[in-house]
Image (cartoon, rainbow, N blue to C red):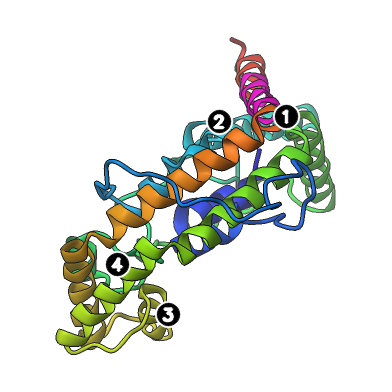
Amino acid sequence: MAPPAQFGRFAAIALTAVLSALSTGCSDNSGKGSADSAPAPPEISSTTAPESGRGGLTGLPLSAYQADDQSSVKEIQARNALIIACMHRAGFSAFAGDGLQAAQPPDNATALPAGAWGYLGPQAAATLGFHPPKRTAPRPNPAPAGSGEAYDGARVDCDRQAAERIGSPPAAGSRLVGRLFDESMKATAGDARVVAATKQWTACMTAAGFEATTPEELSHRYQTTPEPTPAELAAARADADCTAGVNLAGLWFAVLAGYQRQSIDRNAEALTAQQEAVRAQDAKLTELIAGESGG
């Protein structure tokens, strides 16, 4: 569903960017009726915090209607296989994937876990603060033999052909999922239980010597420096302790999941069609990979 560039951001940078990506298309009008009235506060049972913020997001009910990590990796594999085969047909038999995106899943444990729910992961808090882990930029491959204008033209053409063959599920379904995700986040932010837990978190942080009204405000304050500072690491450790102490993350994800289940019930027909489209796209990727690998 998402193009590789979106998957790269999803895998490698802050979860705030994940939320932004999942919330695109919030002005879409498909699935009318989901915003006709304010949703009722959902009943919740378990409030166990997920092991990571990114893991919590990908495990939400609405995430079942988007491509998962495995499918996103598969899309990169299919795109790379198509481009390599195309370059070989174009006469560049030595082309082995120079400059193509590596097909690897994201690391939930090191994805920046700062969000509306607070900081998850005491180990990351103690070593990374509110900064994402550094990633070593790959060394550029030397120009292959025969590179030049013809090579560059073939690469552009092969990229285009691969994108056309891969395609994507209908955009309307993806926009609907994004809009419903955005609506559920807004409902969660205004839920009395989440508001109360956030106030408890604020009081805990104040007692620890750190003024902040929301976890997002706290994390953004420290993300302007190239490296984590001692003050940032101290604030992140306090955030981890306070988040766990008031169970902000567990409550936030439980409430958010409840609102999302309501959205799914109100938009069942459109979302079922979207889920079928996502599954069909995944099957298509499997066929493309098998076809280019000779399987």
Q: Are marks 2 and 4 in contact (CB under 8 Å)?
A: no
Front disc: 1 or 2: 2
Give the x, y percent position of residue 113: 35, 61
Q: Residue at x 78, y 32 (%)?
A: 91
Q: Are marks 2 and 3 in contact (CB under 8 Å)?
A: no
- In this figure, which residue is indicated by the disc labeled 3? 220
The span from disc 3 to disc 4 (Cα, nearest Å) is 20 Å
Front disc: 1 or 3: 3
- In this figure, which residue is indicated by the disc labeled 2? 74
Specify whether residue 142 is in view: no
The span from disc 1 to disc 2 (Cα, nearest Å) is 21 Å
Q: Amino acid at mark 2?
A: Lys
In the foreground, 236 or 62: 62
Q: Secondary structure at mark 4?
A: helix
Q: Amino acid at mark 1?
A: His
Q: Residue at x 29, y 47 (%)?
A: 50
Assess disc 4: are there few (<14), some (14-19) or many (≥20) residues with their C-alpha within 10 Å of its C-alpha.
Answer: some
- In this figure, which residue is indicated by the disc labeled 1? 88
